Image (cartoon, rainbow, N blue to C red):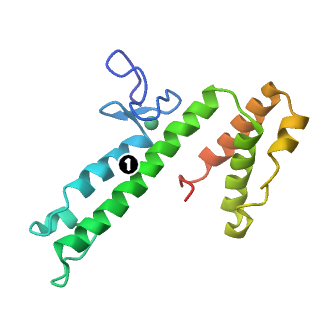
Amino acid sequence: MKTWGKSYPHCKNCTTTRRAHRARGYCTRCYPLIRRLEIIRKWDLNDPKSLKGYFRLSSTWRSDTLESVRVTRLAKVQTQLDYLQMREEQLTGEVDGLDLESAFNHIAARCNRRSANLFQGSSTFFDHNFTPEQKRILFRLLNDIEEACAYKAPL
Ligand SMILES: [Zn+2]
């Protein structure tokens, strides 16, 4: 396991040191996403190898179709990177009722997609019943559950 050091004190995207350094200053979760961004940016209809694993080259594909898919895919991967960054900020900062509502909803959605709003409107419940320290502890525990699951950013 590579460790963080002088060149890379923490992940360049999410700033974590909780996960191992994977490559080029990124943690084990961010680096695969950074690689995916790079691969998508290099898609080229004239170079079928660049599309390997993503598309079968079709004669009906036009460059504007590819560009449209590229923009959508880049945005999706960037959303995942942003999510990882936000999550680290929440883990090191103050946690409020809304953060907990969102974290509980996310776990509930993992159990069952239809339960994605199970805790909607619960933020004041969390704020009224838990001290700031208790909210931080709850958030960390929920994060532990989430990280024990296969990675999936909220859609
Ligand atoms: Zn990271």
Q: Quadrant of residue 7?
A: top left
Rendered view: 45 above or below 28: below
Q: Quadrant of residue 22?
A: top left
Vertical arrangement, residue 82 with respect to residue 7, above or below: below
Q: Residue furthest right?
A: 129
Answer few, some or many: residues within 10 Å of disc 1's Cα (few below 14, many 20 plus, some between 14 and 19).
some
* Dot 1 beta carbon under 8 Å from ligand 1: no
Q: Residue at x 89, y 36 (%)?
A: 128
Q: Quadrant of the N terminus?
A: top left
Question: Which residue is disc 1 drawn over?
Answer: 33
Residue in the image at 38% along x and 48% along y: 33
Quadrant occupied by the C terminus: bottom right
Whether residue 53 is visible here, answered yes or no, is: no
User: Eyeballing the image, is 115 above or below 74?
Assistant: below
On the rendered structure, is 11 left or right of 151? left
- Label count reads 1
Where is residue 32 shown, x and y percent of the image? 37, 47
Residue 21 image position (x, y, % from top left): 40, 31
Q: Is residue 77 left or right of residue 61?
A: right
Q: Label 1, secondary structure: give it.
A: helix
Q: Residue at x 61, y 52 (%)?
A: 149
Q: How far from the left and from the top, in percent, is residue 19?
A: 50, 33
* Residue at the spot 41% in from the left edge and 24% down from the top edge: 3
Q: Quadrant of ligand 1?
A: top left
- Can residue 122 be seen here? The reply is yes
Which kind of residue does numbered mark 1 sit on? Leu
- Indicate the position of residue 103 as horizontal and vertical percent values: 69, 47
Q: Which residue of the protein is positioned furthest toward the top in this rendering?
A: 6
Q: Residue lying furthest left in this view?
A: 46
Q: Nearer the viewer, residue 13 or 97?
A: 97
Query: Viewed as shown, does residue 66 lie left or right of 47?
Result: right
